[in-house]
Image: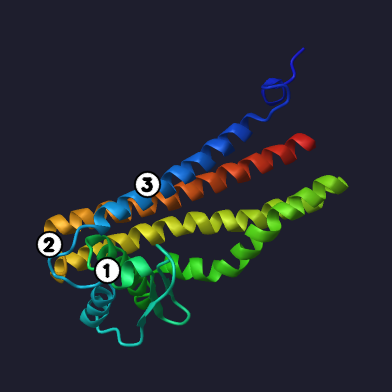
Amino acid sequence: MYYGYGRAFGYGMDPMYFLVILMAILCMVASYRVSSVYKKYARIRSMCGMTGAQAAMEILRRNGITDVTVCHVRGELTDHYDPRNKVVNLSDATFDSTSVAAIGVAAHECGHVMQHHFGYAPLSFRTALLPAANIGSKAGIPLLILGMLLGFSPLISIGIVVFSLAVLFQLVTLPVEFDASHRALVMLEEYGILGHEEVADSRKVLTAAAMTYVASAASAVVQLLRLVMLNNRRR
């Protein structure tokens, strides 16, 4: 008798479950990788002697941007640009450090400033999608589980749709992050903040960081596909 691949595999174990686990492992590896690469290049002092904060302010000055401030936030690799308040937030490991890693990360956040300043469409879309994505990441799975417990298919479908907003946010984040890194590396070399070899080192740091977004997006897509398959199997 034919039971279907999904049911026959592992005595009813969904094969997509293993792919979800694989994606989770990939995310952990990517996270470890960015931490390892950052620590390596955090030990290499830049020739210019600028701190991450000074490099960020220099980039903003070179572009004539006066309405964005550079602030210090607690934590390690918690750097981010807040487009609503126009603040470049640099972490403990970046703000006062003169390493090529710190300057690369600071420049990356300034890359987001440039995106915001020039109306980069993917960033605008991601910013607009953020509230819905937050709801999707928090409510999508609970709604789906509740729908399954109650045997109420419409609620399951709503949960999947809501969760898909969070997945869409992850996907839109990819071009935003890659573009910000590209802008950062161009500005660092063009403005003479880092030398050619130092820019190459910074590129390694930013590429490792970008891979965490790729891993997260891939994991989210796999999880969404698994939920859709489980829902279709119930019908």
Q: Amino acid at mark 2?
A: Gly
Label 1 or label 3, whichever lies nearer to me, is 1
Q: Residue at x 86, y 45 (%)?
A: 151
Q: Is residue 135 visible?
A: yes
The amino acid type of the residue labelled 1 equals Ser
Quarter of the image where the C terminus is located: top right
Pointer 3 local density, CA inside 10 Å: few below 14, some 14–19, many at least 20: some
Q: Quadrant of residue 231?
A: top right
Indicate the position of residue 212 as horizontal and vertical percent values: 43, 51
For marks 2 and 1, give the CA distance. 17 Å
- Examine the rendered structure and indicate whether residue 154 appears above or below residue 78: above
Q: Position of residue 57 (x, y in %)?
A: 26, 79
- Compared with 51, 9 (above or below) is above
Which corner quadrant holds the N terminus?
top right
N-terminal of the two: label 3 or label 2? 3
Q: Is residue 105 left or right of residue 129?
A: left
Label 2 vs label 1, nearer the camera: 1
The numbered dot on residue 195 is 2
Give x and y (percent) for residue 15: 63, 29
Q: Secondary structure at mark 1?
A: loop
Q: Is residue 20 left or right of residue 180?
A: right
Residue name at image x 28 percent, y 75 percent: 56
Pick the front one: 188 or 74: 74
Rendered image quadrant of residue 104: bottom left
Q: Front-most of 177 and 81? A: 81
Circle 1 residue: 97
Q: Which mark is residue 188?
A: none
Q: Amino acid at mark 3?
A: Arg
User: Sequence order check: which comes first, mark 2 or mark 1?
Assistant: 1
